[in-house]
Amino acid sequence: MEKPRQVVRKFLARPQHEGAGAVVRRSIGRFELRYFDPFLVLDEFSVSAPAGFPDHPHRGFETVTYMLEGAVTHEDFEGHRGTIKAGDVQWMTAGRGIVHSEMPAGPGTSKGLQLWVNLSSSNKMVEPGYQEIQSKDIASTSSDGVTVRVIAGDAMGARSPVRTRTPTMYLDFTVRPRAAVRQPVDASWNAFAYVLEGEGVFGSDRCGAPPVGAHHLLLLGQGDVLEAWNKSDTRPLRFLLIAGEPIGEPVAQLGPFVMNTEEEIDMTVDDFERYANGFEKARHWKSQAMVALGLEE
């Protein structure tokens, strides 16, 4: 028999400053929830030029950037450059090392989400790479008042082409007033929901549980299906359902570096400072954004 997942913890993601003048609502990666295997960070970000996320390194995990409004220009020391626009997804494997910048493109405020997905010890030192999908190419389907965009995994007969080194499901649901969602989730995976717009009742008795509003992260307990209801008569509910297979390995983290041991973190810092073992191209590289800001020295 199917077992619905219940909400076991709930967090309101409060604004904090990150990068150079950017504001993020961090839910995973805060002191209340340092790690939810395999997820390291979930940020809902809002940034307007000249603020942003200038040149910075990563090693040992993947970043998933999903734009909601506006656009962000991404550059890295391998010469990769592009603009992630509203509705687009960039799934970046940092692997053994990348240095990049993420800065707003054009006027106005750019908003989106960035998820950090941990990599197993066998994948932490793979070569960096990208999977980029424009909004028009994201798998999407609708039925019975529910629309889903499939960033990773599958739902309602739609499947994403994204390859996930750490098995991951990433779904963006929009639920019309008085409609409901019933989505299977692998029983062995960790799962959470994050509310973007409106209010919804998740994983509980739909008659007795209070609705949950925007910017809340809901950790889901054991089970193999998520149930969610939009009880509003007028407002749609939009939320993310994200799940992943736990890695079950030790985590050692120093800012943008995530390895398995403190010794590996020390080696990573040394590699970055010496421009070695994956960071060689960082020695002479500055992003165009840094140069434009006069920060190239």
Image (cartoon, helix red, strand yellow):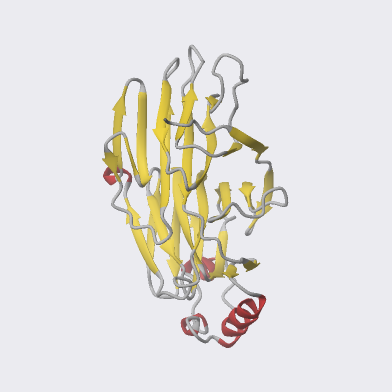
Is 137 displayed left or right of 190 in the figure? Answer: left
Question: For the view shown, which residue lies furthest in the front direction?
Answer: 1
Tell me the quarter of the image containing the N terminus.
top left
Is 76 displayed left or right of 195 in the figure? Answer: left
Whether 4 is drawn above or below 64: the answer is above
Residue 181 shows in the view: yes
Whether 222 is drawn above or below 33: the answer is above
The percent coordinates of residue 132 (x first, y second) are: 34, 56
Is 48 displayed left or right of 148 in the figure? Answer: right
Is 144 displayed left or right of 215 in the figure? Answer: left
Q: How many marks?
A: 0
The residue sitting at 46% across, 22% down in the picture is: 236
Tell me the quarter of the image containing the C terminus.
bottom right
The percent coordinates of residue 31 (x first, y second) are: 72, 52
Question: For the view shown, which residue lies furthest in the right direction?
Answer: 31
The residue sitting at 40% across, 55% down in the picture is: 90
Front-most of 239 and 204? Answer: 204
Give the quadrant of residue 200. Answer: top right
Residue 69 shows in the view: no
The residue sitting at 42% across, 74% down in the picture is: 126
Give the quadrant of residue 141. Answer: top left
Front-most of 244 and 62? Answer: 244
Question: For the view shown, which residue lies furthest in the top direction?
Answer: 233
The percent coordinates of residue 186 (x first, y second) are: 42, 44
The percent coordinates of residue 271 (x first, y second) are: 57, 84
Whether 189 is drawn above or below 177: the answer is below
The residue sitting at 41% across, 47% down in the picture is: 169
